[in-house]
Image (tube, rainbow, N blue to C red):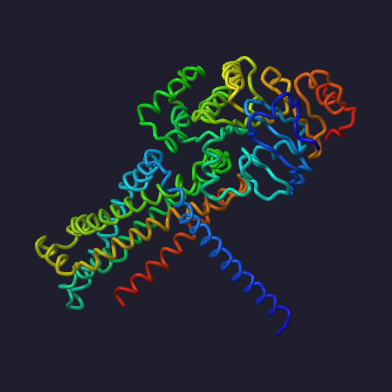
């Protein structure tokens, strides 16, 4: 092995150790949430109510125009492609199956999560990082306020509720909005469209949608908060906000693939 | 260094806080070297000294934010370092801490900032909390800005809001860290008036950390000066005014010549 090869190997090992160290650090942070539940009995929900409501509003209601637009465009594209091309293969009766497969099972949760990460994940990371630099977290700590319970917990609650609602809205808009858009190019009778959808939709799909929304609802604010607590100075804030978004997206794709493989393989 | 400054008949009173041979060093080389002092119920201590003298470490040590140090710090005879997770939160719940830069929560109004400790910790109803907060807002002349966010506040309004938040639970001990620096002397009078009422209460203990000890002359029962992490002066109000100590003399005269090397 020459010097260049060994340098590459050393760099690779260093990178793997860095990634491993990052996972351990994140695990420690996540564990601190469980240990913070020790002071749960002291927590009065009126003190976190506003934070949870604001988070739900920002993540859910404020994201609706974007979610609806993207759902319409994605739904329309999928339906137009399916209705144009399925007849060529003689499988036009499977349009409902395709919609459930593509939109309800995969695109809906994933696209919703991506929008939430880019809007709310980045906002959570930036807000916490700014609070840390402004010594607000320090002030909370010395007041005896558990920062994890006060900052992270209501955001997780708000995100779970908002993401679940957004996924349902995304799917409905994608199905029916997409159907309406597709009418400009092809015609499918509405009763056949609905029947095809209902035939394809199973209870399992609903359970998995719920499961994904809970997992994404926990992971997005958790990872964003983890990176929000990281900056040691003002100039590090954009670095960690960017990391929060990129790494959350990566983890979401991995989790999405894992869940799909687990249930549908 | 010996602990009890101006110990006139204080022995029978409850010891609220004591530092016993505390030494601390961090990577920024700010340090404390074998510091000892005791603070009794009802007393007001002013800790001062130049930048990098170690004064900025005192409040974080008392609040239990720093736990890696040598020596012992006791609050009512309980070792702060030995507090477990719940003890530490209970301890901080009962401690007032007016920190440097105030640490007001930026997405909350003045009223919400002041109410936060009560909303989080107390059993009071929302209406009772509103009444208590209203009294503080009125006493501190904050009526005009009760719905403003910290970003819209003047320095003196931010100070008064932070003060109200730190004492709203009526803590037995209050830590005040560099509160008056950069404040308008006229606009901060309401704050000083309220502070004087509090420090005048024989049941309340206060610890000031400041670069301007003379501003607290009216309230302080004793003074402690640090330089390079060591106690270089300790005494009561009269000792402070006498200025027999060369370090104190140089500090108050703001002179470049004296035992302290000025940065």
Q: How many marks?
A: 0
> Which quadrant would residue B56 be assigned to in this image?
top right
Going 29% across and 60% down the picture, which residue do you hit? A210
Q: Whole-percent x and y of residue B91?
A: 55, 40
Q: Whole-percent x and y of residue B64?
A: 61, 44
Residue B251 vs residue B187: left or right? right
Q: Quadrant of the C terminus of chain A?
A: bottom left
Q: Whole-percent x and y of residue A99?
A: 23, 66
Compare residues A85 and B32 and report the one nearer the observer: B32
> Which quadrant would residue B96 be assigned to in this image?
top right
Compare residues A209 and A104 and report the one nearer the observer: A209
Q: Whole-percent x and y of residue B152?
A: 51, 27
> Which quadrant would residue A198 be assigned to in this image?
bottom left
Check the image and name the residue furthest to the front: B12
Q: Quadrant of the N terminus of chain A?
A: bottom right
Residue A159 vs residue B45: left or right? left
Going 61% across and 38% down the picture, which residue do you hit? B76
Going 31% across and 46% down the picture, which residue do you hit? A65
Q: Is residue B259 above or below residue A154?
A: above
Going 75% across and 25% down the picture, which residue do you hit? B6
Q: Is residue A202 above or below residue A174?
A: below
Residue A225 vs residue B76: left or right? left
Q: Is residue A172 above or below residue A63?
A: below
């Amino acid at each position: 092995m020459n010097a260049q090869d060994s340098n590459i190997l050393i760099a690779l090992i260093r990178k793997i150790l860095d990634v491993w160290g990052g996972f351990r650090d994140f695990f420690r942070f996540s564990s601190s949430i469980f240990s913070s539940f020790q002071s749960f009995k002291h927590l009065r929900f009126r003190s976190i109510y506003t934070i949870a409501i604001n988070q739900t509003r920002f993540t859910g209601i404020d994201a609706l125009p974007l979610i609806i637009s993207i759902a319409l465009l994605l739904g329309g594209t999928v339906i137009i492609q399916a209705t144009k091309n399925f007849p060529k293969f003689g499988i036009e009766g499977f349009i409902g199956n395709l919609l459930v497969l593509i939109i309800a099972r995969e695109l809906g949760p994933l696209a919703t999560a991506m929008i939430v990460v880019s809007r709310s994940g980045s906002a959570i990371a930036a807000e916490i990082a700014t609070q840390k630099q402004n010594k607000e977290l320090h002030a909370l700590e010395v007041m005896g306020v558990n920062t994890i319970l006060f900052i992270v917990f209501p955001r997780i609650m708000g995100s779970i509720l908002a993401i679940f609602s957004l996924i349902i809205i995304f799917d409905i808009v994608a199905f029916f909005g997409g159907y309406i858009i597709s009418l400009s190019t092809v015609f499918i009778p509405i009763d056949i469209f609905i029947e095809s959808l209902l035939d394809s939709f199973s209870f399992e799909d609903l359970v998995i949608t719920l499961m994904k929304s809970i997992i994404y609802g926990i992971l997005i604010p958790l990872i964003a908060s983890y990176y929000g607590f990281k900056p040691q100075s003002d100039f590090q804030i954009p670095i960690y906000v960017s990391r929060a978004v990129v790494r959350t997206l990566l983890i979401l794709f991995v989790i999405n693939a894992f869940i799909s493989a687990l249930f549908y393989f | 260094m010996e602990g009890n400054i101006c110990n006139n008949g204080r022995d029978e009173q409850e010891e609220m806080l004591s530092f016993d041979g505390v030494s601390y060093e961090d990577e920024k080389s700010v340090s404390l070297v074998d510091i000892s002092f005791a603070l009794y119920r009802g007393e007001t201590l002013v800790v001062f000294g130049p930048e990098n003298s170690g004064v900025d470490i005192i409040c974080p040590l008392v609040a239990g934010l720093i736990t890696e140090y040598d020596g012992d710090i006791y609050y009512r005879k309980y070792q702060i370092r030995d507090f477990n997770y719940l003890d530490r939160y209970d301890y901080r719940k009962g401690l007032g801490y007016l920190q440097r830069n105030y640490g007001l929560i930026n997405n909350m109004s003045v009223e919400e900032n002041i109410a936060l400790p009560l909303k989080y910790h107390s059993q009071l109803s929302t209406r009772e909390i509103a009444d208590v907060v209203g009294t503080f807002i009125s006493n501190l002349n904050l009526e005009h800005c009760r719905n403003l966010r910290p970003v819209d506040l003047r320095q003196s309004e931010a100070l008064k809001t932070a003060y109200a938040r730190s004492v709203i639970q009526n803590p037995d001990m209050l830590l005040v860290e560099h509160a008056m620096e950069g404040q308008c002397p006229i606009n901060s009078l309401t704050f000083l008036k309220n502070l004087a009422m509090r420090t005048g209460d024989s049941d309340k203990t206060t610890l000031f950390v400041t670069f301007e000890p003379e501003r607290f002359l009216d309230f302080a029962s004793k003074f402690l000066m640090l330089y390079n992490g060591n106690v270089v002066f300790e005494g009561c109000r009269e000792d402070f005014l006498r200025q027999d100590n060369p370090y104190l003399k140089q500090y108050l005269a703001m002179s470049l010549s004296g035992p302290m090397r000025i940065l």
